[in-house]
Image (cartoon, rainbow, N blue to C red):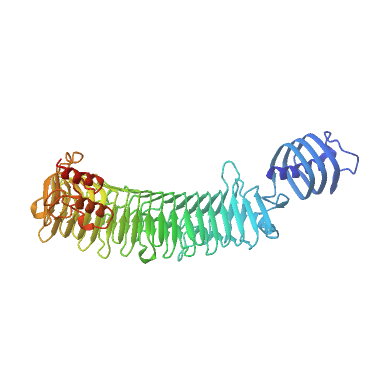
Amino acid sequence: MKNRFYLFLFLVLTIAIGSQADVFTRPSGPTVGGSDEEVTDSTVVDSLVIDSLITDSINVDSIVIDTLIIDSLVIDSLDIDTLTNDSLVIDSIDYVAIVNADSLCKTLTEAFYVANDTIDADILLVDDSNLGLIVIRKGLTVSLDLNGHKVSIDSLGIYNYGTLTITDSSEEGLGTIRMDQGNVGMIYNYGELTIDKGSFICNAPEVEGTDNRRSLITYAGSKTTIKGGYYYSPYQAICLNGEVTIDAGEFVSSGNCEVAANYSTTAQVIINDGIFSNTAEKPEGNDQRRCLWTCPGSKTLINGGTYTSENQALFLIGETTIEDGTFVSTGNNSVVNYSSANGELVINGGTFQNLGQKPAEGTDSRRSLFTNKGTTTIINGGTFLSNYQVIALNGDATISDGEFTSTGNINVIGNYNTTGELTISGGTFANEGEVDEGEMDSRRCLWTSKDTNTTISGGTFTNNSTAQTITIYGNALISGGTLENKGQGSGIASNGSVEVTNCRISAWNMMICWNGATLVCSGGLYSAPIPSILLAEGCECVDNTDPETMETYPYKVTKGGLPGDVNGDGSVDVADISSVISFMAGSAPEYEITADVNGDGTVDVADISSIISIMAGA
């Protein structure tokens, strides 16, 4: 469309000067030199070079031209029916924008005024321009092609109540809208906005009072789709309300604030991809450098993207679901869940890293995830890595899968929630840290504080420590999971109340129970004997004869009595097989210990086979 229009202009000029050019062949008619108007039916030109052309009106039915070079062009009116051109070069014209391929505008502001008089308008920028206050009315559809040029906003920016699309068709992608003055935003969306490409830079100086410097602000009831572009502000890069979808783009803030803020309580904000970076230096006082902040009542879905900040990558007060993405902090907690009664944080995937160096002074808060009191966190997957503690839990949490690794001298997971529960049914928890000389060894996989409640039914816990793999100061029920301590420490330590009905432990010492605490074991496989003082009533620690597990776990804890006597009636018969089947069906939980006849930690058809073998005298 751009080339076509240029051709219109320049070919028209060709006709106007044709009367003075030998290369022109045209029918007889009024002479052109010095005239105000030229009319011709058809013109064929091989080559034309024009230094300057000034004319009021040119009307041509058809122009065919091979090469046209123009240094300067000023036309008040142009009307061409047909234009054919092979090559066209223009050095300068005094128009900066073209509306719908036929209206030439000396400023972009004028182009928007022209657009407001239509229903659908395509604005092509052909030169750099300043821009004043612009309001796109409701019902109007406007497309702005920056075309590699720069727009400088003088004041107040663009207010969209209609449908606005902003793109940049230039190969270099240098199209830019910027604001260097004023405590205001650049683009305000009340309607429907789509941004495909372009750079949006708000670089106004800091002011006292409320900071309103943003590249983009969207409002309740609006719809915004960001497919790309670069967004920068010394305050928030984007402030979001209404329905928002971000498919791509780079978003940067250099201020003590979040890069993107979600205030939308009526619609969901969806982030599919993008790069979010807070590049500010550490401030004195309260550090609020973040990539994303969400308000109470908001809903956010994160399907991808990269989020990097020295402080927090995400600070979440609203309901949030994370499917994927990379979240990196080099200082404070990477992700903070402050949602409380405002909704859950659900993590199904993603990479959460805090690889910062230990602070020289003050509290060490280098974590992948921190949850506040009253919150609910559900982790179904993801990779979590920290040079310090991986996760600190002060609210309810459920972990079914994921990889959690600490390289620090501290626990991988810390449960400090005294009002709810931590439930772990799967996942891999590893402490790969080292201990400096003179330091106490605290390299654990899980540590729970007094009055907490923890349930473990699965997962793999690995460390290399003189401390314990799992240390419980509260209450805990362990009915599954695999623990391996490669150092000279213990598998489980209780300074509270712990019940172990089933698990697997490989360690220098299986279990310890400190004064005043309780630890009762009624099942499981172990690499060393369990002291009788820790065994539940009626249970005993015996040799593990299962060929698949006996090498790693030569001991097992089982209910005393006749092997295979699941129901405890003093004989091994078909009734014991029925008891195993009932337990497998979930209708006889009282056989949880005795139903594991072969001691492999699982109740299945293999236990029925073991009963049959016992009955056969094998």
Image position of 602 (left or right of 214): left
Determine which quarter of the picture holds residue 173. Answer: top right
Residue placed at 38% from the left, 49% from the top?
Answer: 349
Question: Dividing the image into 4 quarters, which one contains the C terminus?
Answer: top left
Residue placed at 18% from the left, 57% from the top?
Answer: 499
**Is 460 placed above or below 373 here?**
above
Q: Position of residue 181 (x, y in %)?
A: 53, 58
Number of on-image labels: 0
Along the line of sight, the residue nearer the viewer: 298 or 47: 298
Image position of 102 (left or right of 32): left
| Residue 300 visible, this angle | yes
Image position of 2 (left or right of 462): right
Along the line of sight, the residue nearer the viewer: 578 or 22: 578
Residue placed at 41% from the left, 51% from the top?
Answer: 323
Along the line of sight, the residue nearer the viewer: 432 or 387: 432
Along the line of sight, the residue nearer the viewer: 496 or 356: 496
Q: Position of residue 302 (x, y in %)?
A: 43, 53
Q: Position of residue 478 (x, y in %)?
A: 21, 54
Residue placed at 66% from the left, 52% from the top?
Answer: 123
| Residue 203 visible, this angle | no
Q: Position of residue 493 (x, y in %)?
A: 15, 53
**Is 337 placed above or below 565 here?**
below
Image position of 385 (left or right of 116): left
Question: Dividing the image into 4 quarters, which one contains the N terminus?
Answer: top right
